[in-house]
Every structure is written in structure tokens, then in C-alpha cells.
């Protein structure tokens, strides 16, 4: 059976101001005003409660707002977009069906929570949990739950905080005391109702429908249905992908790393909270610093294992920026995160204990700050036959290797070639093209047996062209000592070298 309709509306008042203050916790206890427009014709578009108590109102000019002892902030659309993404991420934990219905400086979205009681409990418990999630990302909101979409929206608009739950069938009674301002009235409609003395939804619902339509048209019928809580609605949910990004425009240029870390800590806290709400972890964080003069300083931090430890991320970011500092004052910061799953390293009963991942990441970061990014990692063989060709790749933690065999059967004896790095030059005597004698480490050896040559070459299409001829040789010196070795001849350089020694 299809569950009964049930909606929860989230209303975030003064959304532009809350979007700015969520990343500026030090300014939350002070009167703050957000200005929008082109200087010097800026006007107040949003403000916090402390500024409202001082007498600041929306629509004031910048000159009028400067009279009050309040902090003036320029509106940031990017920070509002990040706050909106954080809010929708919280809502997505409870239902994938979310519809936006914003209004002015108040952000509104409605969640379709029909059938979620088995997962999150009764509507009151779900609303309390949703409020707590919103507070974790720095947003204060009001929530209303009702069986009607528009009833939940109107009730949320009328509340300043907390939540309320309206039982099915009680929509009209719950809306009766609300002012007409919760409806989207035109100026003409508002003037008409004011002239009639209609101030609440209950008074609007009490008007006879036929007479109301005759005087104000079919739109008045829809308004009366909204006042009764009986207006139908076609739910149109959003479809958005998870995007973890936080951005802040600094009020003053920042030059010191310690001051920048304070800002980065707030941004990282928000990213980790949003990732945790999606049961994900941060696998990489890209830091983009907007510098004075228009340039950008971009750094990427990617630990060996994904995680949500704030202290670990702060240490890694600090070490990376200390090794690669920006070359100018910083005007803005953007953090973008990639999500991943928490890595698990399964150890065997007889395997040695691996280092803790957190300590390993910090150790690698310290080494990179000393010797450089390209000198820390793990060696990886290149796809070539060139001897000793490898590159340094980023270190990645892997599961423990298999336990060694404990079989009592004897293993076959194998020889080992110990490569000389770098190869040592030789003075050699040839008979035709075959080595006959050579001098190695001030000792002359006479070749008794020579196997080869084994010829290899590659990269003929690039300046790094290489070629080599190798001989496996058994040689004896004047004292009768045998030497098993590998000789290499480079045709391009026309040089002989001792490549390695056999045990």
C-alpha cells in the first residue's frame, strides 16, 4: 500500500547571513550585516539577530548601516551555494526526494518523508534528528511536518526555530492563526485583503468562495485553498550529485600561515561533517588559494589511506603549505574534496605489525617537505627492458602479504645476481667481439667462459634511445680466484661496464 503523504519543510531564515557566518564562528557573537549590490550603492540583504536588535533592517543603504556598530560583509554567492549543498546533503540522509521553494532571504526546501517511520522513527523524532544535523553544518533552521505540502511550508515560514508536527486533518486549524504574509501575495492582493480587514489565514478561509472568486478571480480560489490546507501540489524533487566544496572570501588579506590554518580548519570541519553524513571519508583535498594580483596557488593533499580525522588533515595541510608557501597575500580559499572508503589492512597471525596509517601519512609528509615531492614514495618498475629503469609512485598502503610457507621440503638452490648501482667502468681486451680479459677493481681477470651477447634496445623514437649488449662471464685472476659476473657494453656510448656479480 502506498504510504500517506507526509512532508517536512526546512526554513532557514536570513540564509545569506547564515551562509557567511557558518564559516566565521568568531563573528557569530557579533552583530553582522550582509550587503548586496554594486559599491557604493549597496543595500542590506540579510542580517543576524543581534544586528536586528540594534535596529538594522533589510533594504538599508551602506551609509545607513555604517551608523550601527555591526560588522559589514559583502554577499558571497559561492558561499551560499556551498551552504545550500551542505543543507541538501543533510536532507539527503533522510530522503532522496527534496524540492526547493525558496523565498527572498529565507531558504526553503520540502522533504517527502512518507514511509520513513520504519527507518527514522515518528515524524517528531525525524525532525529533531534533522535539526541536529543542520546545526552540525552551522545552520539554524525551523521545521514543520504536515500531510500537506503547502501547510508545512507556511508553518515553517511562521516559525523562528524548533519544529512542529501537525496531525492529518488538522491543517486548517493549525493555519488559522498565521498572518497572510506566509502566502506569496501580489501587492494588489495584499492591499485588497488589508482593505477588507483580512489579516490571518483563518479569516481568509472563512470567506465565501463564490463571492471571493467573483471579486478577485480564480487566483483567489487557490489562496483560499492554501489557507484551508487543502491545495494540491505536484512534487518535483531535485536531482543533484554529491559535491564536497567549501569556499570563503577573506575580509582582509592573509599572509601568515598560522592565520590561514585557522580558516582552513573551519572549512575542513565542514567537509568532514558532510562526508560523514554520507558515510564517506575524505580521500583527497585540493586547496586553491586566490592570491592578491589575480593568481592562484593550487595544492593537492592525498594521504595513503582515506579518513575523517581532522587533526591528521590539518597536519598534512600544514606540512604541505609550509613546504610550498604561496607567493602573495591570500584573498580567498576554496577546498574541494574527493570521497573514498575507509581503508582496511588485514594482518595475518604471524605477520609483523604495520605502522599506524595516521603516523605513516605524517611521516611521509615530513619527508616530502625535506627532500621534495618527487623523492618520496615507492619504486615502480617501468614497462621497459631497460636495466634499472624505475620511477617513484605515490605510496599506497596494501594488505599484508601472504604468510610464508612452513613446509619442511628443501628448496632448490638458486644463484643471485647483485646489480652494481652505478655500474663500474672496465678496461677490457677483446678477441673479435668476445671478451678475453678485463681489469676490474685493479685486478686483471682472464675470461674462461663467456655466454652471449644478449642484445636489447628501445626508445628509438625519442632522445632517450638506449641499447645494451650483455655477457655472462666466468673469469679467473692470477691467484686462481673465480669471478662470476655480468658485463655490459653500450654501443651508443661505446663503453664497457661491470653490471653485476653472481653469488
Image: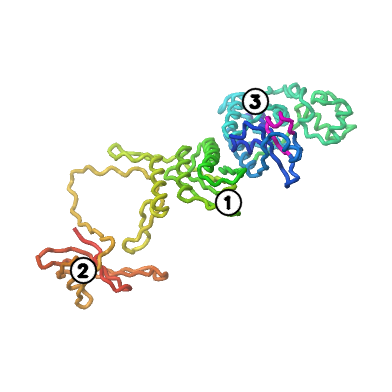
| Residue 154 visible here | yes
Determine whether label 2 and label 3 are within 8 Å by CB.
no
Magenta-drawn stretch contains 493: no
Q: Which residue is mark 3?
A: 162
State which quadrant residue 246 falls in.
top right
The span picked out in magenta is 44-56
1 vs 2, front mark: 1
Look at the picture and state if 384 lies above or below 241: below
Which percent across, then down, holds residue 47? Answer: 69, 35
Identify the residue at horizontal 27%, vertical 38% (top origin).
350
Q: Which residue is mark 2?
A: 451
Q: Secondary structure at mark 2?
A: strand
In the rendered structure, the answer to whether residue 191 lies left or right of residue 134 reads right
| Marks 1 and 3, how far apart at CA | 41 Å
Identify the residue at horizontal 30%, vertical 71% (top origin).
490
Q: Which residue is mark 1?
A: 291
Counting residues from the start of the chain, the first of labels 1 and 2 encountered is 1
In the rendered structure, the answer to whether residue 274 lies left or right of residue 167 reads left
Look at the picture and state if 58 lies above or below 318: above
Amino acid at each position: 500500500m502506498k504510504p500517506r503523504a507526509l512532508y517536512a519543510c526546512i526554513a532557514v531564515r536570513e540564509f545569506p547571513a547564515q551562509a557567511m557566518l557558518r564559516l566565521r564562528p568568531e563573528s557569530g557573537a557579533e552583530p553582522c550585516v550582509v550587503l548586496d549590490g554594486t559599491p557604493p550603492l549597496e543595500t542590506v540583504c540579510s542580517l543576524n539577530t543581534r544586528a536586528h536588535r540594534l535596529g538594522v533592517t533589510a533594504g538599508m543603504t551602506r551609509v545607513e548601516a555604517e551608523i550601527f556598530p555591526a560588522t559589514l560583509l559583502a554577499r558571497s554567492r559561492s558561499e551560499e551555494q556551498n551552504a545550500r549543498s551542505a543543507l541538501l546533503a543533510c536532507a539527503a540522509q533522510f530522503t532522496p526526494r527534496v524540492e526547493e521553494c525558496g523565498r527572498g532571504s529565507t531558504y526553503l526546501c520540502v522533504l517527502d518523508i512518507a514511509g520513513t517511520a520504519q527507518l527514522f522513527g515518528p515524524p517528531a523524532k525525524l525532525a529533531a534528528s534533522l535539526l541536529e544535523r543542520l546545526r552540525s553544518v552551522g545552520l539554524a533552521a525551523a521545521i514543520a511536518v504536515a500531510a500537506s505540502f503547502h501547510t508545512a511550508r507556511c508553518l515553517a515560514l511562521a516559525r523562528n526555530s524548533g519544529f512542529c508536527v501537525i496531525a492529518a486533518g488538522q491543517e486548517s486549524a493549525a493555519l488559522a492563526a498565521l498572518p497572510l504574509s506566509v502566502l506569496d501575495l501580489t501587492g494588489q492582493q495584499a492591499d485588497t485583503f488589508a482593505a477588507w480587514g483580512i489579516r490571518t489565514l483563518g479569516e481568509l478561509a472563512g470567506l465565501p468562495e463564490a463571492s471571493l472568486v467573483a471579486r478577485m478571480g480564480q487566483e483567489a480560489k487557490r489562496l483560499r485553498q492554501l489557507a484551508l490546507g487543502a491545495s494540491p501540489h505536484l512534487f518535483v524533487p531535485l536531482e543533484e550529485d554529491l559535491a564536497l566544496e567549501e569556499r570563503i572570501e577573506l575580509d582582509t588579506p592573509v599572509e601568515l600561515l598560522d592565520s590561514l590554518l585557522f580558516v582552513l580548519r573551519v572549512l575542513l570541519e565542514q567537509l568532514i561533517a558532510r562526508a560523514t553524513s554520507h558515510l564517506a571519508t575524505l580521500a583527497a583535498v585540493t586547496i586553491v588559494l586566490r592570491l592578491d594580483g589575480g593568481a592562484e596557488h593550487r595544492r593537492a593533499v592525498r594521504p595513503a589511506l582515506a579518513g575523517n580525522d581532522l587533526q591528521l588533515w590539518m597536519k598534512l595541510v600544514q606540512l604541505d603549505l609550509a613546504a610550498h608557501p604561496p607567493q602573495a597575500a591570500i584573498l580567498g580559499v576554496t577546498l574541494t574534496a574527493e570521497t573514498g572508503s575507509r581503508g582496511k589492512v588485514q594482518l595475518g597471525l604471524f605477520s609483523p605489525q604495520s605502522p599506524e596509517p595516521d603516523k605513516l601519512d605524517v611521516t611521509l609528509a615530513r619527508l616530502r617537505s625535506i627532500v621534495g615531492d618527487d623523492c618520496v614514495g615507492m619504486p615502480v618498475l617501468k614497462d621497459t627492458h631497460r636495466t634499472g629503469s624505475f620511477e617513484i609512485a605515490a605510496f599506497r598502503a596494501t594488505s599484508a602479504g601472504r604468510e610464508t610457507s612452513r613446509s619442511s621440503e628443501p628448496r632448490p638452490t638458486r644463484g643471485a645476481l647483485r646489480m652494481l648501482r652505478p655500474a663500474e667502468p672496465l678496461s677490457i681486451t677483446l678477441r673479435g667481439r668476445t671478451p678475453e680479459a678485463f681489469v676490474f677493481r685493479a685486478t686483471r681477470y682472464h675470461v674462461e667462459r663467456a655466454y652471449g651477447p644478449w642484445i636489447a634496445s628501445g626508445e628509438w623514437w625519442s632522445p632517450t634511445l638506449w641499447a645494451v649488449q650483455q655477457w655472462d662471464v666466468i673469469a679467473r685472476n692470477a691467484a686462481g680466484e673465480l669471478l662470476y659476473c655480468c658485463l655490459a657494453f653500450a654501443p651508443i656510448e661505446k663503453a664497457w661496464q661491470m653490471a653485476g656479480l653472481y653469488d
